[in-house]
Image (tube, rainbow, N blue to C red):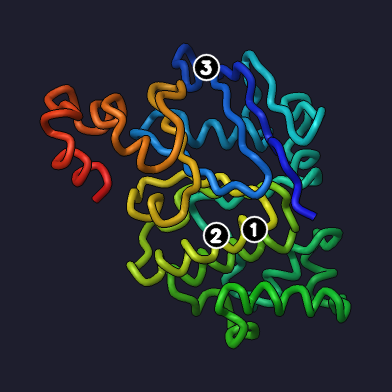
């Protein structure tokens, strides 16, 4: 049964590091079953926002509400993960000398140590689950290959699969297509769209063509605050977004088409 409404809500979230204001009163909703892109120039606060949701950074002000009532800002990272929030970081962290199947086994709930993974056989249900994940990733034929033998894009997909194994209700990704080929980016876009059918996905990304292919809604951060929000087309045409990305020499009316091509190249 599809759930409706917001799965996570940031209310007035501010974060400062040694006087630098990383986030300024951010309000942000992400709905169940939504694939949301978070974009903005370097230093806009995108990764900090993911850190706040995951509990790695505590907000100076504001709340992060997950589900109906849970305030994530009062919890530790491991408690937040257990609630159903999974994250893929920008740099993959797979075990290169283990097989794909062993990497996925490590990620299963209640299997948190290497010894039980290597010497405790997964159940039939767990094997079926992991086979389904590998099939979704297009990696089923490599189930018994070492992760170190994979291409860059395949390693990224494996790590996405390792988060999928945790069955998160909210999936956070930080620049998942960085360094991928065009074909790998297309496959990743399709993968995230499938994932968003039964969970919420919030992705930080600089590749604007990838954002156009995937996102239902886009939030633009600038200097720690929400600058603009809406559909890809609406954000693409917003003069404030064009100015932030391209500088004050551009105007949406006179230079719009050329500016947009550069912004969304």
Between residue 28 and residue 71, name the one nearer to us. Answer: 28
Q: Mark 1 points at which residue?
A: 197
- Residue at left 58%, top 68%? 158
The spot of residue 257 in percent (x, y) is 16, 41
Check contact, mark 2 vs mark 1: CB within 8 A.
Answer: yes
Between residue 17 and residue 218, name the one nearer to us. Answer: 218
The spot of residue 124 in percent (x, y) is 87, 81
Q: Which mark is residue 16?
A: 3
Q: Residues within 10 Å of mark 2 (few under 14, many from 20)?
A: some
Q: Is residue 177 above or below residue 124?
A: above
- Residue at left 86%, top 76%? 125
Q: How crowded is mark 1: few (under 14 residues within 10 Å), some or many (20 or more)?
A: some
Judged by depth in the image, the label closer to the viewer, 2 or 3, is 2
Q: Is residue 59 above or below residue 126?
A: above
Quadrant, the N terminus? bottom right
Q: In this view, does 164 lie to the left or right of 79?
A: left
Q: How crowded is mark 3: few (under 14 residues within 10 Å), some or many (20 or more)?
A: some
The spot of residue 261 in percent (x, y) is 20, 46
**Kind of element beneath mark 3:** strand
Check contact, mark 2 vs mark 3: CB within 8 A.
Answer: no
Q: Is residue 248 left or right of residue 16?
A: left
């Amino acid at each position: 049964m599809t759930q409706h409404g917001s799965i996570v809500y940031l209310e007035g979230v501010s974060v400062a590091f040694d006087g630098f204001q990383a986030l300024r009163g951010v309000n942000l909703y992400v709905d169940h079953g939504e694939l949301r892109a978070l974009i903005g120039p370097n230093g806009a606060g995108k990764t900090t926002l993911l850190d706040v949701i995951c509990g790695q950074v505590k907000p100076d002000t504001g709340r992060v509400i997950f589900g109906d009532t849970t305030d994530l800002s009062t919890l530790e990272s491991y408690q937040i993960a257990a609630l159903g929030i999974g994250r893929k970081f920008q740099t993959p962290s797979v075990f290169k000398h283990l097989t794909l199947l062993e990497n996925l086994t490590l990620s299963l709930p209640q299997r948190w140590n290497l010894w039980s993974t290597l010497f405790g056989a997964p159940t039939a249900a767990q094997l079926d689950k992991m086979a389904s994940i590998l099939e979704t990733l297009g990696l089923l034929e490599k189930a018994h290959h070492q992760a170190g033998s994979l291409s860059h894009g395949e390693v990224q997909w494996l790590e996405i699969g390792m988060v999928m194994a945790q069955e998160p209700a909210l999936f956070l990704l930080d620049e998942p297509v960085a360094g991928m080929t065009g074909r790998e980016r297309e496959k990743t876009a399709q993968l995230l769209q499938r994932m968003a059918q039964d969970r919420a996905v919030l992705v930080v990304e600089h590749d604007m063509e990838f954002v156009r292919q995937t996102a239902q809604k886009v939030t633009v951060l600038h200097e720690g605050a929400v600058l603009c929000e809406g559909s890809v087309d609406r954000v693409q045409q917003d003069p404030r977004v064009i100015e932030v990305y391209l500088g004050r020499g551009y105007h949406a009316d006179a230079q719009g088409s050329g500016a947009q091509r550069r912004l969304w190249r």
